[in-house]
Image (spheres, coloured by chain):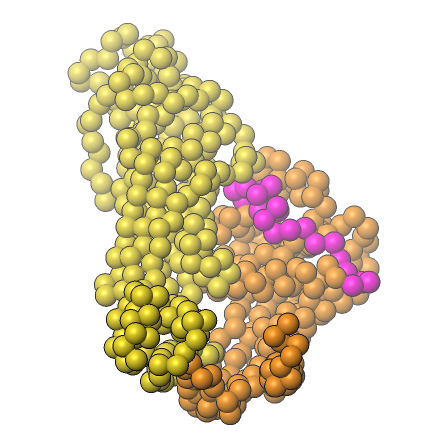
Chain colours: A orange, B yellow
Amino acid sequence: MRLAKNPGLHRLIAVVIAGSMLGACVTSRVENVREGNTGILEGEGVVIMAKSYHLGNETEAKFIACVGDSIGRGKSGLRVIPNNEFVDALFPWFEPRTAPAETKGLPTLMSRPGVAEMIKQKGVRYVVWLDGDTDKVAGGGSLSCAAGPGGGGCFGFAWWQNDSNYQASVWDLSGLEDAGTVSADVSGTSFLPAIVVPIPLIARTQNKACNALADQLKLFIVSEDAA
Amino acid sequence: MSRSLKSVAEHSRVEYGTNAFVFAQINGYTGVQLSFLEVTNLKSRRLKAASALAVIFSMAGCGGSSVKLQNPSIPEPLIDKLPLKVAARYPEVFDHFVHEEQVIGKEKWSIDLGQANRMLFTQLFGSMFTEFSVIDADDDARDLGLDALIEPSIDAFEFSVPSQSQTEDFAVWIRYRIKIFDTDGVQVANWPIAAYGKSMTTTFGGDAALQRAAILAMRDAAALIILQMDKATGISKLSSAKKSNAETAPAVPTPESEPINLHTTAAEEPSDETR
């Protein structure tokens, strides 16, 4: 009620929303290296995993979920088996400590009791191992905000640069081989000018890397028919 | 003036005098602004809002939490069971384990594992051996016709929070120790296990991230035990050893008789402890 009667507040909200929707500068590079033929049949799916933190990997769980969602979305979406479901079903063989680090460990893994059967039952054709993270590499400026009984506001200017570097290794479980890698390198600078109202111009590098990597992975997996 | 100030103090339970500090943090840049609260003509709603803000901001930086693990479980492992009749005897600490971590000058964290360790090992050993039971401290294992008695314990439990590691990670380290006794009560293995779990605070939030890290550490221990227990302790030999002992050796072990094969780490001396 109070909101509807306050056009000034409307304008303020509109400015903040418009500002937050404006994109900041982002540059991206997506590459793939193919090691073998790919292709996927009906009923087959992929599982998105993070490389083990025992190996120093820092990939964010949020990013893994994002890639999984993006690969499964849309008309050309692939069947994505939830990461937790896969890891639990194959316990203890895909725990951070025990998961194979290279494809040459796959034959041994598949010979373990129940593993090949469970993978077949889950319909997993590809395991995609994600590696990398998003880092803030630079930043500067200053911004201060104050609030009092008469109102509040911010003044200043801040900026920061984020780099999102991710690599996805695609393992084909039907041939027990490395199908190749897809990498996304996204860099962007965010700005936050504020004259009373802060107007965020955010470079969503992680989100951009997620979508770019997922789109390229979809193409990578379906583009050649290995059936 | 004095009446209004009294009202502020009553709402916030914090004595501010005539000044209040308001902190705002935006995208990692912390600005500090001093505002003079002219409270004389404030309406009641503003007073409430201001006092609430004052309390919230005054509490910033006083983090810390108490986390309780609620019945964690491990999935059913994809393994072949060892054909052994095994029992486990747990220490009292497995029924109620609490660990506290004080970050110097900052927050205090505590984690209550409750019966999580008892549940973990019961579920794990139940999946690893064809016959498994849990015995009490005063039960005599030699009367039960076991192939082996396992006594797990916790040597150490540690965790780190983001303010310590300067990362976004909660990390948990658990060092378990597994002692194995043969059918005669002779200790045949003394095996330390170091397990580790890590979880990001941005993904699960503080409490949930610490819980998740603890569960991952326990799963890590379970995976390690499944993978290496037989190799490290030789437990699978105990069944056949019992049979061959029954056929060839005297029924009552002599004091000179040696343990079958005492497995320890290189850093540890074999113990002659018997049960």
Q: In the displayed structure, would residue A165 be above or below residue B87? A: below
Q: Residue at x 27, y 8 (%)?
A: B250
Q: Residue at x 61, y 52 (%)?
A: A83
Residue drawn at (43%, 75%) of the image: B43
- Give x and y (percent) for residue B17: 25, 77
Q: Which residues are magenta?
A: A74-93
* Up-down relation of residue A218 to residue B32 (above or below): above
Q: Position of residue A192 (x, y in %)?
A: 52, 86
Measuring from the top left, give residue B61's x and y in whole percent. 33, 68
Left or right of A77 in this view: A193 = left
* Camera-side residue of B274 and A91: A91
In the image, residue A92 above or below residue B47: above
Considering the image in quadrants, where does the C terminus of chain B appear? top left
**In-front residue for pair B39/A139:** B39
Residue nearest the observer in this picture, B191 or A5: A5
Q: Is residue A210 magenta?
A: no
Q: Position of residue B12 (x, y in %)?
A: 33, 67
Residue A80 is covered by the magenta coloring: yes
At 32% across and 29% down in the image, what residue appears?
B90
Q: Quadrant of the N terminus of chain B?
A: bottom left
Determine if residue B189 is in view: no
Instruction: In the rendered view, tell whether residue B267 sits above or below residue A132.
Output: above
> Between B182 and A184, which is closer to the camera in this rendering?
A184
Residue that protrudes farthest toward the left in the picture? B255
Q: Quadrant of residue B230?
A: top left
Q: Horizontally, is B96 left or right of A159 in the view?
A: left
